Amino acid sequence: MDKNYRALELDKILEMVANETTCEDAAEQARSIKPVFTAAEARYLLEETDAAFVLMAKFGAPSFSGLKNVTNALRRAQAEGGLGFRELLDIAETLRAIRALSQWHGKSGGIQNALSGRFTILAPNKYLEEKIFTCILNEEEMADSASPALATIRRKIRNASSRARDQLDKLIHSQSHQKHLQESIVTQRGGRYVVPVKAEFRSEVPGLVHDTSSSGATVFIEPMSVVEANNEIRVLQSEEQDEIHRILLELSAEAGEFADSIIESYEYAVQLNVIFAKAQVAYRMKAVVPTIDERGRTLLEKARHPLIDKDKVVPTDISLGEGFDTLIITGPNTGGKTVALKTLGLLTLMTMCGLMIPAGENSRVAIYRYILADIGDEQSIEQSLSTFSAHMTNIIHILELAGENSLVLLDELGAGTDPVEGAALAEAIIEELRFKGAKLACTTHYAELKAYALQTEGVENGCCEFDVATLRPTYRLLIGVPGKSNAFAISARLGMEERIVSRARELVSQESSAFEQVVGRLEESRRKMEDELEAVKASAAQAQRNARQSEEAKAEAEEAAKKEMEKARQEAALIVQKTRQQADALLNELDEMRRRKNKALSAEEKARLRSGMKNLELSSDPVHRRTNEGYVLPRPLQPGDNVLIFDIDKNATVLEEPKDGQVLVQAGIIKTRVELSNLRLLGEKQKQKQRGRTVTRSLSAADTSTSLDLRGMNTEEGLMEVDSFLDRVSRMNLTQVTIIHGKGTGVLRTAVQQHLRKCPQVKSFRLGTYGEGETGVTVVELE
């Protein structure tokens, strides 16, 4: 790696990416990522990372588990070579991983983005994958079902073995041979069935001697009665090995036929693994995609150095190229100058590598052909170079490469030699780099360079803020303000005698002292303005909160008033209804009495009585009615018009044409006739306002599940679901999850637990206890 990139610690960032990958090839690719030098390339790489980031946020990360580099094995198979058990199993596992990736992309809805092309190239081969897994059980065992011939041979071997054992069982249980045997057992030597016989009785048991014990007291004899059966077994075992070899060659030939597509799919799967690893690093850093600036301007908002603990790092704003091409950063030691310099360089390199950066949403980054850095102590004992000489050697090399498309970062420029000469040399180097068109950021303690920045157009001062009262840096980078070294203040605070500090102040030249005083006054004014600004912001925020609270209180009061009014109206309606019912009952009773006396009420008497009832209704309505205030309807009312019943402040809809100065309206569930003079026509704006009322609701986040149900799945489907589930829950920082596989035959449970032993996210696991599901579930503890 370029030493400039190493000085900015890009190698550590790439190692973080490598640690997020699954296979060795992907890790190696991550470590060898190189920055690109054009805006278009950087933008494309960032689009890929952002696409992976978005897919992970929506659907969880895909599983790359099982990917292995099988290129050599496939090329050998392609050349008609034979492959072993392990090599074929690796090919099958790689095919399963490729198929899982393709299925994951299918489940994501086939969203078209910068990664769609790579996913499309993936070529799953379920036929070959299943054939290999069906034929090969593990690294040493071929399944009986691999071929009919193999199944027949193994059946014959079992039959021959059974006959041999039956013969030997009769022998060891024979009364005549009991005293001859060391033990009444059947064992094997050299793949042939034998019995242990005492050495002194070896002639009593006719047969072939295959072995003796270490003490010589026991000989292992193959009785003549089982020689033929053992011979048959040996022949069959030879046929078995030949058939296994034939099956391996057949599987190898089929793998060779698909070699090119498998290798291509593997290569693209590795690339996807690296891209999703970039996205995973971005997720951990809480990073964003910066805007690529093609005019050489960099603006980092709330930038954080990614290698500093996120709980300790202080976000800072850094800009370069916007109004000035050179930034001179000053301030005390340990104040954060070098961190600011490294943050600028490292975040630029990360962008050029297609990595999202830990900064604010509106950050912009320029792309450079060269990023040249002289940071840290370059002293070399081997080359007999002092610190100053080493720095100058590095800077000479930088001067040779720097140009218009370069970013130069220099730490403690001109340090390590005579201050006067060092300041002059530093100023000359800055002028030369500016003449070449390079963007430059450097740190220094020289007051001459602070003055140079104040007097030179295109050069800007910056300082790392330092709190003299607490002797601690705040790590904030302030652009446009020169910094003070604060050497005298720090020394006094640490306990140095005042007379020594005072003498030091006297020895400082009057010009330097005046300059420091000006800087100090600027710093004091800046802090005072910042305090006032914060106070104004706090007051404005409080005023906004008060206004919001007032509005909310007003709205609540109006709503409460409306509710009370509606309640009163409903109560009044009930009173009116009851009164009308009582009046009608009274009229009916009077009519009945009149009829009995053959004397009916006159029309005048009925009208008078009904008029009294209407007065009763009006007097029983407790609602205070407003006066009309001389309002005149702008036009005749029509069915469907929205109107306001003025005296009770209630919206209603016209149902019929007006008649005799009244109109039938509906207010809520109540239909009633209202005087035209008591109605006001609502205009179009009020209608639209009525129609436009909407109710908003917030979408709740999907419930996070801590269990996975595999019941009804086969082993292959279940394991793929387990991989996806573990990837998802590990990002959620869960410590314990449950996998439900059911009791059944135990095949799925065994496969899941064997798979969990290989998963890096798993710390331990156990079967469920009473109340958890017992043997039907596996409880997993996560790292």
Image (tube, rainbow, N blue to C red):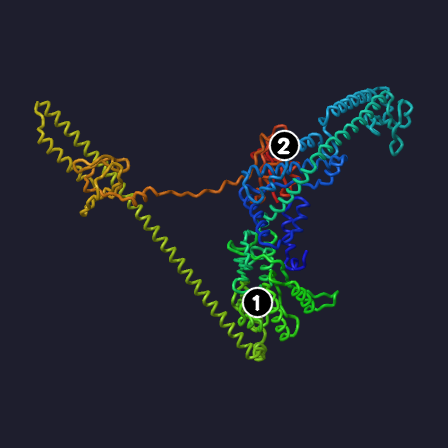
| In-front residue for pair 338/126 | 126
Q: Residue at x 61, y 34 (%)?
A: 718
Res 250 quadrant in image: top right
Query: In x, y percent, where is residue 28?
Result: 68, 48
Residue 362 appears left or right of 756: left
- The N terminus, quarter of image: bottom right
Q: Look at mark 2 in the image and give the residue it sits on.
A: 715
Residue 464 appears left or right of 188: left
Q: Look at mark 1 in the image and give the residue it sits on.
A: 328
Amino acid type of the residue that numbered disc 2 sits on in the rendered structure: Thr
Res 768 quadrant in image: top right
Q: For residue 287, say whether it is visible.
A: yes
Q: Nearer the viewer, mark 1 or mark 2?
A: 1
Query: In x, y percent, where is residue 182?
Result: 85, 27
Q: Residue at x 51, y 72 (%)?
A: 520
Query: In x, y percent, where is residue 457?
Result: 53, 69
Q: Where 473 sits versus 76, above or below?
A: below
- Local secondary structure at mark 2: helix
Amino acid type of the residue that numbered disc 1 sits on in the rendered structure: Ile
Q: Which mark is residue 779?
A: none
Q: Where 417 sits versus 772, above or below?
A: below
Q: For residue 623, say whether it is visible.
A: no
Q: Residue at x 60, y 67 (%)?
A: 435
